Image (spheres, rainbow, N blue to C red):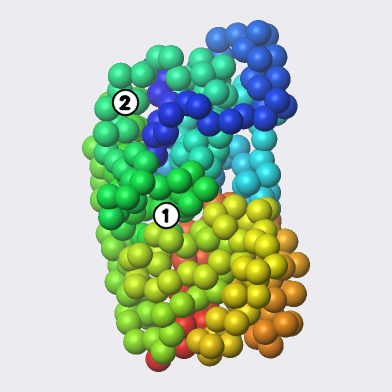
Amino acid sequence: MRLSITNMPRPASAVLSAFVLLVIAVVAACGSEPDEPADGKITVVTTTYPLTFMARRIGGNRVSVVQLIKSGVEVHDFEPVPSNVRTIASADIFFYNHLAFEPWALAAATASGSGSGGTAQSNAIQTVILESEGEDHGGKEVDDADFDPHVWLNPLRAQEQAERIAAALGTADPDGSLEYVRNSDGLEAELRGLDELIGRRLSDCALDTAVVSHLAYGHMAERYGFNQLGLAGPSPEFESGPSHIASVIRQIDELGIRYILQEPIASDRLAETVAAEAGVDILIMHPLAVRTVDEAKAGADYFSIMQENSEALAIALQCS
């Protein structure tokens, strides 16, 4: 059984580039039914690192996990090539985050055939909603431009993702269901522990606003009670205009902010410019969609990077 599972469903009207459409059309025209894996493992394809980490932790030795967007690649710049679509076609399960984040994912899955075999089950899993369709938590409509897909930066939201991954694996491999549940329970306990650690670390802070390179930290900010002031919007390649940057610099001065939190993969040009103008320093804060190449080589994982994030945030917010 092949399933295409999305963490947060959206309409299939997301705009794809002409290049992506061409890739999908070529593969759909030339593709063939993929062979089943010889080792009998469930084949899982993911888009981003948090999904990879959770699928491996929960699946253990029963799954083989392939991540499409490799370490060191800027997620917002990624577009699939034919080999990526063939990789999806070889999968039993395809996990992705959201069509506002990976606008090519659903079309690639459909072209590969992975979206056709488990539609009913896919929809059933999607009813475990991580982000209500078109609404924020206050019930107000949310524009796509304001959408923040980085749910994994709140460990309790990551726990919800883990539950859905375990359910999907159990559907594809009923014989492994108990193992998946046990592994998921263990992971979720660690996530709750991480949530408590971050909460303690950020419990007594002089500031309630952090300046970030782009607005990737909304779920974390909501959980731990701080505000994010972004140099750019939800996607780092769309930089703000001069008036916004001037406003950020003014607020840095008025609020007594000492640091800008810059992600490790995207360009730091704007952050460096603002830091020099405002007379502040830069710390690394990781949106964690993918790891850097060095982090992957060193074996840094979700938990170690999230702890580093909380340490940087505690410094930026002047927590005691």
Along the horizontal axis of the image, is 81 left or right of 89? right
Label 1: element kind? helix
Q: How many marks?
A: 2
| 69 up-or-down from 220: above or below | above
Residue located at (61% from left, 61% from top): 232
Residue located at (36% from left, 18% from top): 118
Between 241 and 297, the one nearer to me in the picture:
241
Label 2: element kind? helix
Residue 179 lies in what quarter of the image? top left
Q: Residues within 10 Å of mark 2 (few under 14, many from 20)?
A: some
Q: Residues within 10 Å of mark 1 (few under 14, many from 20)?
A: many
| 137 up-or-down from 110: above or below | below
The answer to whether one can see residue 161 in this image is no
State the quadrant of the N terminus.
top left
Find residue 41 and name its label. Answer: none
Question: Which residue matches tag 2?
Answer: 123
Residue 248 in the image: state x and y as whole percent: 59, 75
Question: Which residue matches tag 1?
Answer: 152
| 209 up-or-down from 297: above or below | below
Residue located at (70% from left, 67% from top): 242
Cα separation, mark 2 vs mark 1, equals 21 Å
Residue 19 in the image: state x and y as whole percent: 72, 27
State yes or no: discs 2 and 1 in contact (Cβ < 8 Å).
no
Residue 18 in the image: state x and y as whole percent: 70, 25
Along the horizontal axis of the image, is 133 left or right of 293? left
Residue located at (46% from left, 41% from top): 97
The three-letter code of the residue at mark 1 reads Trp
State the quadrant of the C terminus.
bottom left
Residue 92 in the image: state x and y as whole percent: 45, 24
The answer to whether one can see residue 8 in this image is yes
Q: Earlier in the sequence, mark 2 or mark 1?
A: 2
The three-letter code of the residue at mark 2 reads Asn
